[in-house]
Every structure is written in C-alpha cells, then in structure tokens.
Amino acid sequence: GAELEVLRGASTVLREVRPYWAIEIGKYSTADFGDVPRGVVSLMRTYNYRFYRCLSYDVEITQQQIEAETTPDITLDVLCIPAERSWS
C-alpha cells in the first residue's frame, strides 16, 4: 500500500539509477494510504517506465488494464522496467 510513498522518496534512484521494480498494485492496499493504483502508474510513467505482468514479461500492460484488473480484493503484481532498457 505504501508503494507510492516509497517511489516518491526514490526520485533520484528512479531518475539516475533506473532499476527494475517489482510492485504490487491494488485498490484496497493503496486506499489505506489515501491513493489509487493510478497514482503509482502515473508516477512511474513520469520517469518513463513500462509495466509488465510478473507472469508474462513479454507483453506490456497499460494504465487502463492495470485499473481494470485491480479490484478491492485483487492486486496485480507488475514489473516496472525503464523504457530504454530491454527485458530480454
């Protein structure tokens, strides 16, 4: 649930180091911190990251898919990869 707060605090790392991130996104957990999944996705997009399901790394997923697939009871595990880096 605190993913957004962690990512906000990691702005230098996101901008300069550009690591891969594994993040769990869910409506219930982010709501505990006053946020929605869109906040995590939007922040990572500002740093030019792409999103992939942890079980199928070969297909990028969109913000709309993330929002549609997360419910109060369901979270989505995603891998965030800098756009300039290849997954292979």
Image (cartoon, grey):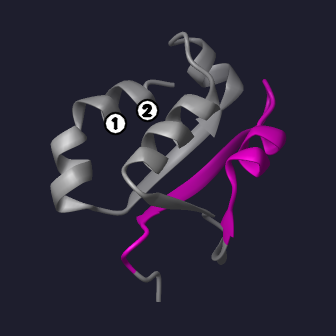
Looking at the rendering, the stretch of residues picked out in magenta corresponds to: 60-85
Q: In the image, residue 84 lies at what x, y percent?
A: 37, 75
In this rendering, would 65 be left or right of 25? right
Label 1 crowd bin: few (<14), some (14–19), many (20+), radius 10 Å: some
Q: In the image, residue 18 lies at what x, y percent?
A: 26, 61
Q: Is residue 57 above or below residue 74?
A: below
**SS under mark 1:** helix
Under mark 2, the amino acid is Glu
Q: Is residue 59 above or below residue 82?
A: below
Distance in Å between CA atoms under marks 1 and 2 = 6 Å
> At x 42% / y 45%, what residue is drawn?
46
Q: Residue 17 — which label?
A: none
Q: In the image, residue 28 lies at what x, y percent?
A: 68, 21
Q: Nearer the viewer, mark 1 or mark 2?
A: 1
Under mark 1, the amino acid is Leu
**SS under mark 2:** helix
Find out whether the residues at labels 1 and 2 contact each other: C-beta distance under 8 Å.
yes
Magenta highlight on residue 71: yes
Foreground residue among 12 and 34: 12
> At x 43% / y 65%, what residue is drawn?
81
Residue at numbered disc 2: 3
Q: Is residue 29 above or below residue 75?
A: above
> At x 60% / y 64%, what residue is drawn?
54
Residue at numbered disc 1: 7
Foreground residue among 87 and 42: 42
Magenta highlight on residue 27: no
In this rendering, would 68 be left or right of 3? right
Q: Quadrant of residue 74?
A: top right
> At x 62% / y 23%, what residue is drawn?
36
Residue lying furthest bottom? 88
Label 2 crowd bin: few (<14), some (14–19), many (20+), radius 10 Å: some
Q: So how many labels did they put on this image? A: 2
